Amino acid sequence: MMRSPRRGLLSAALAAIPLVAVVAGPVFAVNTVTQVVNGGTLTASVADLTLTAVTVTHSTQPSSGSLTLTADDSTGKALGWNVTLQSSAMVYSGGFGTSPANDIAAANLAVGTPATPVMTAGQAIDVTNGPKVVGTGGALNTAIKVISANATYGQGTYTQAEPLTLTVPANPRQGTYTATLTVTVSSGP
């Protein structure tokens, strides 16, 4: 059989082309995803409270109320924390005398036994590690610790009722008495 000259050239040309085998494998990208989480804050606060009005008498009388303390640990550090309350004197304002002579001493304002904390967001309360009640209250002329959480606990928002009693002295001046309540939150139980 006779070969065509064209066919012979084509075969020779194909034989001259090197064959390369391509094997497909996994392709790896060198891309990354990064997320930065900034630390939040450690805060504690109470709203203003107006106690029920009393009438001038010749003997001491109690005036009671309740504050709601809110504590929040959004730091992401899990160091634990504690909150204290302290009051200034009840400063008199009115038209019957002067301040500080008519002020009511800070020792006359006391916090009773704080209520059990309630979690409103975040980590559940642990009976042993907190947040938990600290102490049974006392006169607010010195700082009184009312709530705390151990390290790795208390990572959330919590409320706690704080019962207050003001002992109004006998024969107070008619007018308004106002104290500044300092709420301090610190890291560590």
Image (cartoon, rainbow, N blue to C red):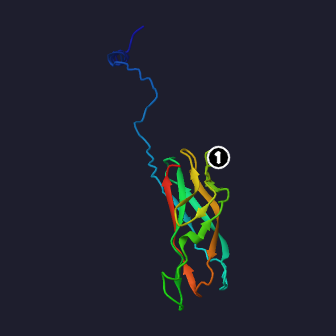
Place residue 55 in its image quadrant: bottom right
Q: Position of residue 180 (x, y in %)?
A: 51, 73
The residue most toward the top is 1
Q: Quadrant of the N terminus?
A: top left
* Observer-nearest of 73 and 59: 59
Depicted 168 relative to depicted 30: above or below: below
* Observer-nearest of 89 and 37: 89
Q: Position of residue 132 (x, y in %)?
A: 63, 52
Q: Position of residue 26 (x, y in %)?
A: 46, 28
Q: Residue at position x 53%, y 67% from top?
A: 141
Place residue 34 in its image quadrant: top left
Q: Position of residue 19 (x, y in %)?
A: 37, 19
- Amino acid type of the residue tagged 1 in the rendering: Asp
Label 1 Cα neighbours within 10 Å, binned few <14 / some 14-19 / many ≥20: few
Left or right: 7 in relation to 118: left
Label 1: which residue? 126
Left or right: 81 in relation to 120: left
Q: Element under label 1?
A: loop
Number of numbered labels in the structure image: 1
Q: Residue at position x 38%, y 20% from top?
A: 20
Left or right: 10 in relation to 179: left
Q: Residue at position x 57%, y 84% from top?
A: 176
Depicted 53 relative to depicted 164: above or below: below
The residue most toward the bottom is 95
Q: Residue at position x 41%, y 20% from top?
A: 21
* Observer-nearest of 18 and 133: 133
* Observer-nearest of 97 and 75: 97
